[in-house]
Amino acid sequence: MNDQWTDLLSEYVDGELAAGERSALEAHLATCGDCRATLGDLRRVVARAKSLEDRAPKADLWSGVAERIGAGRVVAIRSRRFSFSVPQLIAASIALVLLSGGGAWLALKPRPTQGSAFGPRTGPRVTLAVSTGRTDAAIADLQDVFERNKSRLDTSTVRVVRQAFATIDRAIAEARTALQADPSNAYLNLHLADTMRRKLELLRRVNAIAAAQS
Amino acid sequence: MLTTFAAAVLVSLAPLQGETDTTIAVPAGASLSVNNFGGSIVVHAWTQNRVKVHAEHGSRGAIEASLVGNTVTLRASSRHGAPSVVDFDITVPQDMALTLSGTYTEIEVDGVRGAITAETVDGSIDVRGGSGIITLHSIQGSVTLADATGRIEVNSVNESVELSNVSGQIKAETTNGDMTLMGIKSSSVDASTINGDVEYEGTVSDGGTYSFNSHNGDITVSIPEGANVTLSVATANGDIDPSFPLPLTRTEGKHRYTFKLGSGSARMEVESFQGDIQLRRPSEMRLQHKDKDKDKNHEEN
């Protein structure tokens, strides 16, 4: 599955693709089971997002976010037929990554919420505004996959990937520390969510490369 | 004629002193797929409807070429199982779509006007030209793209990403490296790095969306005079340094500030956790970038 096709899926669901792009995507969907599965996931997410509106979210991913950040601010998503609030965006940015690339099952697995195998173990998570338990679990699972399959990669590639993981982990740790001092800060919450998304995406990408080397 | 093209053609090309040369006639709208384990893939364009392949490889290596439907596929193989190192030099029709992949492979494309997908694990990607969907991914190499238009996604993990004279929808990411976007014409740009600087010089179109993000680096963005943009600027530990007056619209907590210029119809987010944020006019930005290039060249020499 190619990220470029994945990016088109959202606009496809919204009926916003030009005819040429729509035809190209439909041709790709005919041969790519992963993209068809992601399309199904995306349709479910969109349907759920439309139904959320002013109701408080129930899933763990959303817990504590709305009350701490304040759900009043609504950010319009250009060229979309619905809009998200800031807390919804924080959760959705992670949830969509979990849903894409066949990662949805990871998010559904019950896991401990304390630190990942690779990431820094910081203080109690209750002090953070964003509930990151599921994301931590997904990262830990993907990290396990990487550790199992890293022998398929060249040692220099493994070294470079580890450096990148370390860089992202430091950024996550710094964002968490800043959030502990200022838990309601919207920028810090979004920055943490985005940095964790980066780690998930990198793990997915590296694991796909390792799998292709077999 | 078309039936000739539609038929599957598979040629296992025998090496001659470690070199392979072949030319394949292709129909209009044909695409090229090349997979190489190690070495390089260099692609040029010409006006003929033929794909010309020159490959240099070890005496045990071979090149498999096939034309199935509209797709020419080139693959490096080895008689004894071990992956071979091949340097491909390929000339293709200008509008040909390319899918190029490798593991320890440098990729270079010049003058092609079709869609381009290039992915490598250890090697740089350097593309000039391209239109439509352009996807360039490297783990250990730098990625540069120039003179391209379309829906563009470029990323590296451990090196820099550079875009120049590029138009269309742009998404660019790296983890350990700088992000440089110069001469951009776009209403949708998303550029981010974790550990590096970000520079953007380009259009700020009415109704456009722009996002520039770094964790550890400085961000410098040009805002053209007369731009209509709502600018959201955030930094946890850095400074905000505009070279022109900015009307503050809103402050959110300690770290985020919103400014509205003109009608504010475009949305731009500029965020660096540790670094400074500089807002400049395009002429200042180009000058600053030139000075930075000079310093870089000086250091390298």
Image: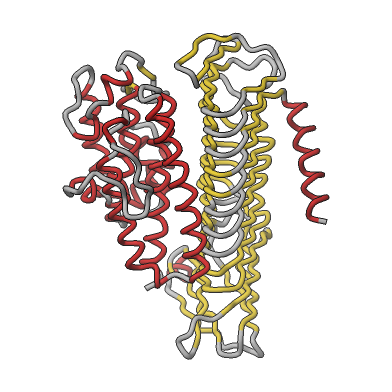
| Count of numbered circles on the image | 0
The residue nearer to you, when weighing B264 against A95, is A95
Residue at the extreme front: A123
Q: Where is residue B120 in the image (x, y as percent from the top left)?
A: 52, 62
Q: Is residue A41 above or below residue B58?
A: above
Left or right side of B203 for A197:
left
Q: Is residue A172 above or below residue B62?
A: above
The residue drawn where x is 37% and y is 45% is A6
Q: If the image is split into quadrants, where does the C terminus of chain B sit?
A: bottom right
Left or right side of B81 for A183:
left
The residue nearer to you, when weighing B137 against A180, is A180
Q: Can residue B31 be seen in this view?
A: no
Q: In which quarter of the image is residue B61?
A: bottom right
Q: Can residue A138 be seen in this view?
A: yes
Q: Position of residue A35 (x, y in %)?
A: 31, 50
Q: Position of residue B202 (x, y in %)?
A: 66, 30
Q: In this view, does B301 lie above or below B232?
A: below
Q: Quadrant of residue A75?
A: top left
Q: Coloured how? A: secondary structure
The residue drawn where x is 64% and y is 86% is B18
The residue drawn where x is 66% and y is 22% is B241
The residue nearer to you, when weighing A81 against B21, is A81
The residue drawn where x is 39% and y is 66% is A210
Q: In this view, does B298 lie above or below B52?
A: above
Q: Where is residue B234 in the image (x, y as percent from the top left)?
A: 52, 24
Left or right side of B184 for A84:
left
